[in-house]
Image (spheres, helix red, strand yellow):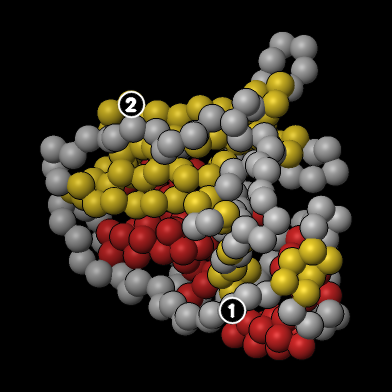
Amino acid sequence: MRVLYDVLRRRGFSYGRRERKPFVAEPVRVNGEVALTGVYLSSVSKPVPHPNLCWKEVEAGSPLSFTYHFADAGLVRLFVEAFAEDPVVEEPACKLSLASISVVQRELPEPAPGGRLELFKVRFLTPTSFMFYGRDVLYPSPVRFMLSALKGYSTATGVDAKHAVDGLVKTVEAVGAPRFKRFLVDIGEGRLVPAFTGEVTLALHASRDMPLLLAALKAAELLGVGISRTLGFGRVLVEKLGERGRGGELPEGAG
């Protein structure tokens, strides 16, 4: 995310820590593979660096890829122009040189009818954390997940999701046993925040809001869920299941 901020500053854009931002980020990929870093394990006395996910050594010359999702087309243009004018970014740990850049316009799904009961497996691919009135929610809460997905979809499309939000307790539930692990993540300047990865199978029950719920659920793959999405948190993969669908294994390396 620091690369994005540094490039946007060339055009005079700066964002506060708590300011709503018109973009979300995916974790950096090294040779095409997501590189999760900064993960610590909780302990009674003090955090312990995760043996595999705390640091990532990258050889000089290895290709790194950064993926950002913008909600503002004008900001995309400024970002591309700034990078094209000066394709080198100096960071404390290294110097990055632009090899290529591509832009793809994505359309969010439209609300569409669903069945009487829809099942989905949701995998939390990167550290995720929800909030409930200022308190951390560190498990795949079905209500917190759908609330975040609906809010993200409503913000991006302008669709009024209030009625669907009000009825969530009757329309979504986790079936089977959610699988997840908790840990701490270094988000910079020594700040460790709690998060989780894992998976959950969600059941959506038929209601007049089903079309909107299905659209928001699918859009969550692009928009992310939970807090700190500009740091790569809350990236999810959503898979539709049959009525007998079951959850699978945790993502490889999930804490």
Residue 101: mark in rendering: 1
Q: Which residue occupies the foreground of this view, 107 or 145? A: 107
Residue 14's spot in the image, x, y percent?
83, 71
Look at 50% across and 62% down and name the residue there: 223
Total residue callouts? 2
In depth, the one of 150 and 65 nearer the eye is 65
Q: Please identify the quarter of the rendering in which residue 66 is found.
A: bottom right
Circle 2 — which element?
A: strand
* x and y percentages locating residue 70 in the rendered image: 59, 74
Which residue is rendered at x = 49% and y = 34% of the image? Answer: 253
What amino acid type is highlighted by mark number 2?
Answer: Ala
Height in image: 192 above or below 47? below
Q: Residue furthest top?
A: 44
- Image depth: mark 2 or mark 1 in front: 1
Residue 177, can we see it? yes
Q: Amino acid at mark 1?
A: Ile
Whether pointer 2 and pointer 1 mark residues with C-beta atoms closer than 8 Å, the reply is no
73 w.r.t. 169: above or below:
below
Spot occupied by residue 175 in the image (x, y as percentages of width and height): 28, 33
Residue 177 is tagged as 2
